[in-house]
Amino acid sequence: MNTMQTIAIWAIPVLFAITLHEVAHGWAARHYGDHTAAIMGRLSLNPIRHIDVFGTILVPAVLIILVGFGFGWAKPVPVNFNQLRNPKRDMIWVAAAGPAANLVMALAWAMIMKIGLLLPGQSEWVATPLILAGQAGIIINLVLFLLNLLPVPPLDGGRILTGLAPARFTGFLTRIEPIGMFIVFGLLALGGLKVILYPPLRFLSSMIGGFFGIPI
């Protein structure tokens, strides 16, 4: 499979993964009292409203070319935590909504892949794209699920940790937030992300593969 075919297969799963991740944050925020995302039109499922040229297009494309799979991010959905009915508690659920959406999407792509595998041989022209896109959808969503749960602000795991941590620790977490993404990219460059993410990624992939009877 050439590079353009690989990018074409990954494009839709990546767009869905990052779009629904961000929209899930907005939906959860609205549920708990903050309507900022709704007012700014960011609860739309239209990917164009959420695309970040660097994180949505360039980074995934480069990673697909270099390592064979990609992940990325969209423009963060704006959330005003002060508008939440109980900011410290509700931020946990707002932050968790994004990774939860990715986990649900991984299961949905597994079903799509299973459908592709069940199609008769003469339907290969339909089955093959479903299988390949399904496999890509499972991987990207599990990677985003695990990556975003890292306890580093401003990742969702950092937000969850901030909501759970005693008040005396929240100041420290707030101070490291501006350098949080540098920490993540440093781990990526040094190979630390692979060490951290690969074992749970392999476990979840095998669980989903075993449950649906599909090769991942």
Image (cartoon, helix red, strand yellow):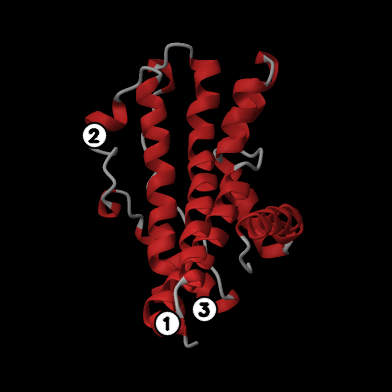
The residue labelled by disc 2 is: 40
Instruction: Give the quadrant of residue 193.
Output: bottom right
Residue drawn where x is 42% and y is 82% of the image: 124
* Residue 124 numbered tag: 1
| Mark 3 crowd level (few <14, some 14–19, many ≥20, 10 Å Cα) | some
Q: CA distance from mark 1 to mark 3?
A: 26 Å
Badge 2 or badge 1: first in the primary sequence: 2
Identify the residue shown where x is 49% and y is 73%: 132
Pick out the residue farthest to the bottom: 2
189 on left or right of 17: right
Q: Residue at the location (63% across, 48% down)?
A: 146
In the picture, measured across the screen, residue 160 lies left or right of residue 49, that is: right
Eye-nearest disc, 1 or 3? 1
Q: Is residue 89 left or right of residue 196?
A: left
Label 1, residues with CA under 10 Å away: few <14, some 14-19, many ≥20:
some
Q: Quadrant of residue 8?
A: bottom left
Is residue 74 among what the camera can see? no
* Residue type, mark 2 in image: Met
Ranked by sequence position, the earlier of labels 1 and 3 is: 3
> Residue 49: where, in percent of width, then height?
26, 49
